[in-house]
Amino acid sequence: MPEPTFGLFLNLGAQLAPDHAGVFDFALRQAELAEQLGYHDVWVTEHHFIDFGINSSALTLAAFLLGATRRLRVGTAVTLAPLYHPLQLAEQAAILDQASGGRFDFGIGRGGYLADFEAFGVDLARWDEEIDRTLETFTRAWAGPRPATPRPRTGSRPPLFAASTTPATLAKAAAVGAPLLHYFAAPAPARVKTEAAYAEHLPGPPPIHVHTLIALVADDEAKARERLREALTVSFRAGDQPSVPGASGRHGSLSREELAKGVAENALIGDPRKLADDLAAFIGATGARRLAFYMEAVGDQAATLSSIEQFAGEVRPLIAAMEHPSI
């Protein structure tokens, strides 16, 4: 089994800096630091009209970060498929695959905020249908009498990932061989259950899924967990908007405060030794081989950068020294 790889998950919440310029500057700083310290990848989100995350085009930011780095992989987590034509997405993904030398990972999902569909004049029926249509399009965009251009550099299509837990989309993603992108707040048992449902439709061996999660290096665990809870409360309040009918949401009827408290309690936080042990347990429980840490969830630039540096310098070597941490 391959050794686990580690990356970063960048959500670009407005609270990270006094202005939007500072938020984007900080995203670049994290990506540059990740490359310097040997992280495998960074993943960027897409949101519209909310301070929970101010980046409104995952593809555009991914292109910028790919141009600013030389080794680091960059992925979208996620591009909101219902808001775009699937063939246009295929073309844009192929451009980034080619121009980056094969370092781009294209993650797609549904989203679910009603305002997105209203503002862009998108039929609500696309919320349920378009992610599956995009997955299908990627299997045939470069075939037939009129193939899309450019052709991908990486095999028959750019690397494609799907963020979903719905049975139909899990089946479609498995059928086309698109690995899953797991939501950062999903508990380990839920991830295992989702992958089991996905595996029922696999035509071959399982791919390597991506696990986003909150992980922080901190000597004072209680203080860091409380700081995280406070930051998540602000963040989740900023994202508390009406959903598309049919989008049940990941958290049911929980208040933003209850949600923040629960997510903070389940985050992996501790000194280097404890975090290494907790991550080894997470890897053992889920079989995760590719992890991306939402360190900026703590809402503070200095604390985020400290965790990025300490993980690379102290935690990663401890995990590497463990005998078969995935078993």
Image (cartoon, rainbow, N blue to C red):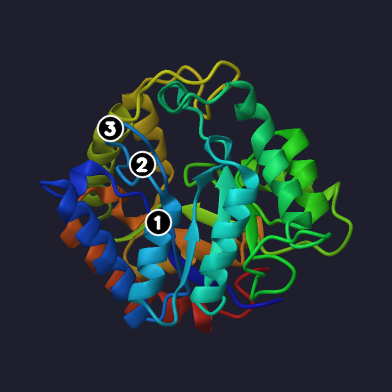
**Label 1 with label 2: CB-CB less than 8 Å:** no
What residue is drawn where x is 15% and y is 50%? 17
> How many callouts does the rendering have?
3
Mark 2 Cα shell of 10 Å, populated few (<14), some (14-19), many (≥20) = many
In the picture of the structure, the residue carrying the numbered disc 2 is 264
- Gap in angstroms between the C-alphas marked 1 and 2: 30 Å
Mark nearer the N terminus (3 vs 1):
1
What amino acid is found at the position of numbered circle 3 in the picture? Thr
- Viewport quadrant of the N terminus: bottom right
Mark nearer the N terminus (2 vs 3):
3
What amino acid is found at the position of numbered circle 1 in the picture? Thr
The image quarter in which residue 125 lies: top right
- Up the image or down, 112 lies above or below 149; here it is above
Mark 1 Cα shell of 10 Å, populated few (<14), some (14-19), many (≥20) = some
- Up the image or down, 40 lies above or below 169; here it is below
User: 303 or 71: which is nearer to us?
Assistant: 71
**Label 2 with label 3: CB-CB less than 8 Å:** no
* Residue, far left: 18
Mark 3 Cα shell of 10 Å, populated few (<14), some (14-19), many (≥20) = many
- Gap in angstroms between the C-alphas marked 3 and 1: 28 Å
Horizontal side, residue 134 vs residue 5: left or right:
right
Residue 35: x %, y % from top left: 37, 78
The image quarter in which residue 59 lies: bottom left
What residue is drawn where x is 68% and y is 56%? 179
User: 227 or 93: which is nearer to us?
Assistant: 93
User: Closer to the observer: label 3 or label 1?
Assistant: 1
The numbered disc on residue 233 is 3
